[in-house]
Image (cartoon, rainbow, N blue to C red):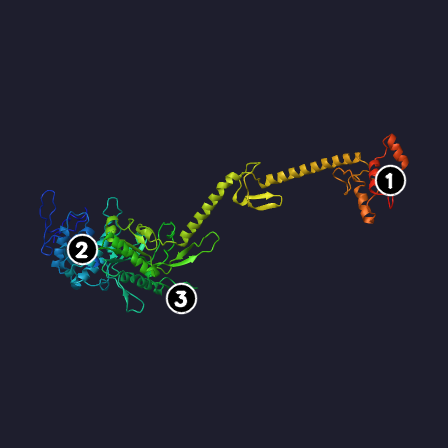
Amino acid sequence: MSTRQCPDQPDGSDDQADAGEPAEPSRPGRIAFRRGAADPNGSTDALRSDVLGALGVLKVATADQLQRLLRPGAASNKAIRQALGDLVLHGLVASDGNTKDRHKTWRLEGTAGLDAAAAVLGMVRSDMGGTARGAGRSGAQHTMADNETIAAFVLGGSAPGAAGGVGTVRSWSTETEFLLPGGRRKVCPDGVWQAPEIGVPVLMVEVDRSTMAPADVAAKSPRYRELFRTKAKSTAPALPDEEPADRMVHWWRRTWPGHTRPGHTRPGHTRPGHTRPGYPPVALVVTDAGPLALANRQQAVADLARDAWGGAWWTITRHDNDGDGCREYDDAVPDIATTLELLAEHGPLGPVWWRYGRQGRHPLLDALGSPDTREAYDERRAAREKKARQEHREPMRTLACADCGNVPKQETTWEYGPGGRQEWTRRPGGRCWDCHEKEQQRREEERQAQARARLEAARTANAALRPCWTRRGSIGGKAGSSLELRERAGPDRLECPQCLGDRETDELGPLVLPAPTKREQMAALVSTPDDPWWETRVLHAKLCPAKDRRV
C-alpha cells in the first residue's frame, strides 16, 4: 500500500510510503493518493487511527462531528468519509442510521472495532464499553448532544474573540460506570473530562435535553456525593506512626490526584499547593429548549439538589460581624451549569458557567471556586476593617491638636480632662497628651500665682483694719498659719480665726464689747475717739443692755 500526505494533515506528517511502488502523478496544486486494494478510498493510517480513537470515545458520531473534532481546518469532511469507508471494508466501523438532520451515524463494529479502538487509545478492552449497536436507528439524539458538548470543549467558542478549547477528544470518556457502595447501584455520567493541564483533574458532565423531570436530574447530585464519599486504602508508602484508619483516602484522589488551582489566590478559590475543598465537580449542560425555559430549569435543579452542593454554614461570632460567616464544602459536590448554546458560542473557558449558590456566569476555573469560603469571609472582614479605619481617619483630620497640630491616631483619640483620660473621642479643639500636660502645668502655675496675689491683698487689707479684740494682732490671723484669712475680713468681724475657734471650744458665747463710759461719750462730742472699736462698742451698747452684760 502506498500513501501520501493527506490534505487535512499538517506538513511533515506523511505516512511512510512504500519504497517499491511509485506514486501516481498528480496535477499541479493537488495531492493525489494511490488507492490500494486494502484501502481503496485512499485514507491514511493516521486518519483511520484518529477516527477509531474518536469513535472509541464518542461511541456514535457523524462524519461532520468527526471532521470538526479531528481535522477542524479541513474544508469538508471528505477525508473523514474516506477513512470511514476504508474502516467499513476492514469490518471495524458500521452505520446504523441517520440523525434528524439526515446525517449518517457511525459506530464501532463488533469486537474487532472495540479492540482496534482500545489499541489506539491505549485502554483495556473491558473498559471500552459497548458498540452502541442500533443507537443510530432512532437518530441518537442524546449522543449527538453529548458529542456537541465535547466538541464545544475541544474546539472552544465560535463567537469572535471567544476563548479557545482545551484538550482533545481523547481527554474524554463516555459510558464510564461507577459502582456505588453495595455494588448494585451505579453512576454513569454522560462524559468524564480530564484537563489537569489547567487545574481540572476530572469533571463529570451531565447533558440534559430537557426530556427528564428536574427532580430526576437533581437526584443525580446526591448519588455523586455518595460515590465521592467512598474511601479506599492509600497506595502511598505508609509512615511508621500512621494508624490503619489514616491509610484510608477517597478513592477519587487516587484516581485523579491533584485537585488544585495552580497560581490562583482569589477569594473563594484554592491557593497554590492547596487542594480545592469538596469533591470533584459536576457540570450540567442543558439544551433543546428556549433561553427562559433553560434558565428556569437550571434554577429548579439547583434548588432541588441544594443539600448535595450547599455545604455547611458556620457563623463566626464577632462584635462587628453582623451574623457573617463561611461555608464548609468538605462534603459538598461543586455543581456548575450552562446551556449547550452558550458553551458552543463562548467555549468552556468563557463566562458561561453558573455555579450553584453564586450570582452571574463565570469562566470554568472561576466557577469551580466555592462561594462563601473562609478565604472569602476573611476578605470581607478585611474590607470591613479597612472601611472602619477609613471612616475613623476622616474625622481624625479635624481633630488635630489645638497647640501642636498633631493628628491623632486610632489608639490616641482619647480626650484628657480634669479627671484624666476620658473614654470618648477627642473633639475638635482638643489637645494631645503632651500638650495636655503642658497646659495643665501652665494652669496650675497660674492658679498658684493668682492665689498668692489674693493672699497678699487680703493680708494688706486686714492689716489696715482694726486688730483682733482678744489678741490685738491682725484681724486676719497669724501670717502663714492654716487659719489665716485669705480674703478681706468683714466689717462685723471682732476676732481673728484663732480666737473665734478658741471661743467656740470654750463655749464662751458671742463676744460683747464694753459699753462706752459717760466720760468717753462726752469726749466723743468734742473730737473723734482714738479707738478703732468705738463705733462697734456704741453699737453693742444699743443692742445689748447693761443688764446681764458680759465682756
Of mark 2 and mark 3, the one earlier in the sequence is 2
Instruction: Looking at the picture, tell me which residue is in the foreground, 311 or 402.
Output: 402
Q: Residue at x 90, y 36 (%)?
A: 518
The residue under label 1 is 515
The residue type indicated by label 3 comes to: Ala
Disc 2 residue type? Answer: Val
Disc 2 to disc 3: CB gap under 8 Å: no
Disc with the residue nearer the chain's start (2 vs 1): 2
Q: What residue is at 79 percent from the left and 42 percent from the top?
A: 497
Residue under label 3: 245
CA gap, disc 2 and disc 1: 146 Å
Most distant residue in the top direction: 526
| Image position, residue 390 (x, y; %) | 47, 43
Crowding around mark 3 (Cα neighbors within 10 Å: few <14, some 14 to 19, many 20+) is few
Give the crowd class for mark 2: few <14, some 14-19, many >=20 residues within 10 Å. many
Kind of residue sitting beneath label 1: Ala
Disc 2 to disc 3, C-alpha distance: 46 Å
Residue 463 percent coordinates (x, y): 79, 35
Q: Is residue 458 left or right of residue 409?
A: right
Secondary structure found at label 1: loop
Q: Is residue 31 left or right of residue 471?
A: left
Left or right: 142 in relation to 421? left
Secondary structure at badge 2 equals helix
SS label for mark 3: helix
- Residue under pointer 2: 51
